[in-house]
Amino acid sequence: MTNELVLIFDFGSQFAQLIARRVREQNVFCQIVRHDISAARVKELNPKGIILSGGPASVYEPGAPHCDPKIFELGVPVLAICYGMQLACYFMGGKVGQTAHTREYGRATLTVSERNTIFQGYPTESTVWMSHGDQVQVASSDFEALASTDTCPLAAVKHKTRPLFGLQFHPEVAHTPHGGQILANFLRDVCGCSGSWKMTAFIDNTVRDIRAKVGNKRVICGLSGGVDSSVCAALLVKAIGPQVACIYVDNGLMREGETELVKHTFRDWFKADLHAVDARERFLTALKGVSDPQEKRKIIGKTFIDVFKHEAKSIPDAHFLAQGTLYPDVIESGGSADGPAATIKLHHNVGGLPAELGFELVEPLRDLFKDEVRRLGVELGLPEEVVWRHPFPGPGLAVRVLGDITEAKLATLRKADTIFLEELHKSGWYRKTSQAFAVLLPVQSVGVMGDGRTYENAVCLRCVQTDDFMTADWSRLPEDLLARVATAIINKVKGVNRVVYDISSKPPATIEWE
Ligand code: XMP
């Protein structure tokens, strides 16, 4: 795909993916690999540079993750961060350890003594983020210090004869405000990367790869209306036009206008072969009277597969199935050839259709992070509304109408949800939050309207900020915005007389209510 590859060795750092995203921001392609990948394999991959991540271990600990020490002899530039630096220095005769004052968590002031190479253009004094127990206490005479903090004399080092740099702090996190400069210097000046990995080049290469793989066979693409599947479909349409058949299942649990947007975007705009299946009745009949959340999910999942399978059968010579799998899913499922082992992380959005469908998979987004998928979407001409769409769960509004589902409840929720989302868009808050929606609570409460007493439904507004959806904080929306939304919902949505705002974080609460 590119002749400029940077490898990121994962020593179990919570920041490995963040390092990768920072490198990509410099338009350099990179991949996360296991820490124990052999030097021979690295040589084969022929990277322009290597970055060693941090990690929670201590280098002397039994079972501590080590890399193949021969990687330092390949002549490939290495930037070793935190644990990575301790490991590199330890391999080369240094002493790593902990003294009473070496533990450092949080912000520290870095003083740079040598403003060349990786510190070119860097302030002499600046804030950096530290998070370590151990540190390099004594480096071998092969190293020289480049920077220090009060408690860490060797906060940055350079090998005197090899292209090897070590940083005790984390340049990848936002709390190190100039960290991007170090990465840019390393990639450009030390590794000699040109930073030419652009979305347009990605599109050209991927289009070529898809055509080569698919030949003249047909591809089925499941379209949910979400960002990933929409970008995946748009890319396929660009690559193979009418050979791709997009299947969109309207399960009756979508939000206001969602089905129309999918139809308009793909049928009218992309001129795609869109199979929009109206399965609303089937889903709602199957869900009738069911109020247990897991039971609802099971029914929806099974019905979806049945409907999808049936529609797929109507597409002759379908051989491939396209999925919008992203790089974080590939890493976390252990699905990348040189990548780290699977991490145990349960996420609802991973999965997809069962292998028994018998298709060969096409996953054109499997090297991309979410922000890159959005950039790709823009480049492919998808509307903003699709590109910046918040995630929406597979079971849709079924897990936002608490308890049993009826058409009437869905209609009420849709109206409230639309008012909330419209106000977020108008105020510019939609893009500042990660996910926002309304929930129809299974409670009724007393109110007054005009001269009369009412006893009607309550709607809850949920809005969160999150990086990975594993933890989340509730969004501090402005009071006047919340007031406007509440007033509009109570005035315009029949059957609702009370609106509440959810101020719980995840954990312990989840983002969805069911
Ligand atoms: P929770 O509620 O677990 O949600 O904090 C985390 C993220 O996952 C989405 N979500 C789902 N997505 N099927 C999906 O495809 C589901 O059953 C499901 N449940 C939750 C949720 O919207 C949030 O983005």
Image (spheres, rainbow, N blue to C red):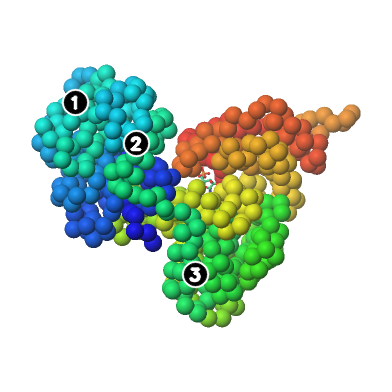
* Label tally: 3
> For the point 64% across and 54% down, which residue is it?
383
Residue 462 placement: quadrant: top right
Q: Nearer the viewer, mark 2 or mark 3?
A: 2
As drawn, 298 above or below 187 = below
- Which kind of residue does numbered mark 2 sit on? Ile
Residue 250, image x, y percentages:
65, 61
Q: Secondary structure at mark 1?
A: loop
Q: Gap in Å between the C-alphas at discs 2 and 3?
A: 42 Å
- Residue behind mark 1: 98
- Residue behind mark 3: 321
In depth, the one of 56 and 400 nearer the eye is: 56
Residue 512, disc: none
- Residue behind mark 2: 182
Q: Gap in Å between the C-alphas at discs 2 and 1?
A: 26 Å
Tell me if residue 153 can be seen: yes
Side of 148 relative to 219 (left or right) = left
Label 2: few (<14), some or many (≥20) within 10 Å? Answer: many
> For the point 70% across and 61% down, which residue is it?
264
Sequence order check, earlier mark of 2 and 1 = 1
> For the point 34% across and 49% down, which residue is it?
193
